[in-house]
Image (tube, rainbow, N blue to C red):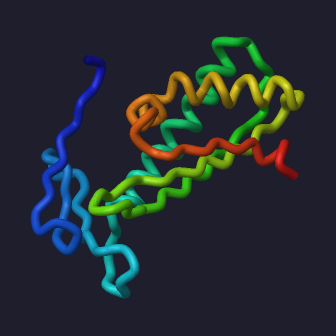
């Protein structure tokens, strides 16, 4: 293992969550309420966006692609099918400096190496879109 961290939650969606080393503590709240705080889906979206964006950067370096910049936006939805709660994820990627075919190749490879993508593969609906190609 190259890294691990520990988080502790108390009170569920209307409680608090903190890192075990006390470097970050957040008030949690249920999505859709006006209560102040954050919900797990927001935190997951932030982590996934950062991880996928880094996968793009590292993969471009590995393939010696002249990536000038990238931005990853992740939208995480919570769905309920029967009595089961499921995540629904959309990843929107903007890439600068590459030809369209290179962008598509980079996005596909980043989706293969990103730990968040690997964790969700087969367990959640995940759509990846290249914003340059959908314009």
Q: Is residue 82 left or right of residue 63?
A: left
Q: How many numbered callouts?
A: 0
Q: Is residue 12 above or below residue 52?
A: below
Residue closest to the far front: 82
List x then y, in percent, for residue 115. Answer: 43, 29
Q: Is residue 78 left or right of residue 134?
A: left
List x then y, in percent, for residue 63. Answer: 70, 12
What residue lies at 37% left-to-right and 74% top-to-bottom?
A: 31
What residue lies at 64% left-to-right and 12% top-to-bottom?
A: 62
Report which quarter residue 132 is drawn in: top right
List x then y, in percent, for residue 40. Answer: 32, 60
Q: Is residue 56 above or below residue 34?
A: above
Q: Pick the quarter of the image with the N terminus.
A: top left
Q: Nearer the viewer, residue 61 or 126?
A: 126
What residue lies at 22% left-to-right and 51% top-to-bottom?
A: 23
Residue closest to the far bottom: 34
Residue closest to the far top: 63
List x then y, in percent, for residue 41. Answer: 39, 59
Report which quarter residue 83 is drawn in: bottom left
What residue lies at 30% left-to-right and 19% top-to-bottom?
A: 2
Residue closest to the far left: 10
């Amino acid at each position: 293992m190259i890294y691990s961290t520990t988080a502790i939650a108390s009170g569920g969606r209307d409680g608090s969550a903190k890192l075990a080393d006390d470097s970050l503590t957040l008030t949690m709240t249920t999505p859709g309420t006006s209560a102040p705080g954050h919900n797990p889906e927001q935190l997951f979206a932030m982590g996934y966006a950062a991880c996928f964006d880094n996968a793009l950067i590292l993969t471009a370096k590995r393939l010696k692609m002249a990536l000038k910049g990238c931005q990853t936006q992740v939208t995480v939805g919570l769905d309920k099918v029967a009595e089961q709660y499921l995540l629904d994820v959309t990843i929107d990627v903007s890439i600068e400096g590459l030809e369209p075919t290179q962008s598509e190749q980079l996005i596909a490879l980043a989706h293969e190496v990103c730990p968040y993508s690997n964790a969700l593969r087969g367990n959640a609906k995940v759509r990846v879109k290249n914003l340059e190609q959908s314009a």
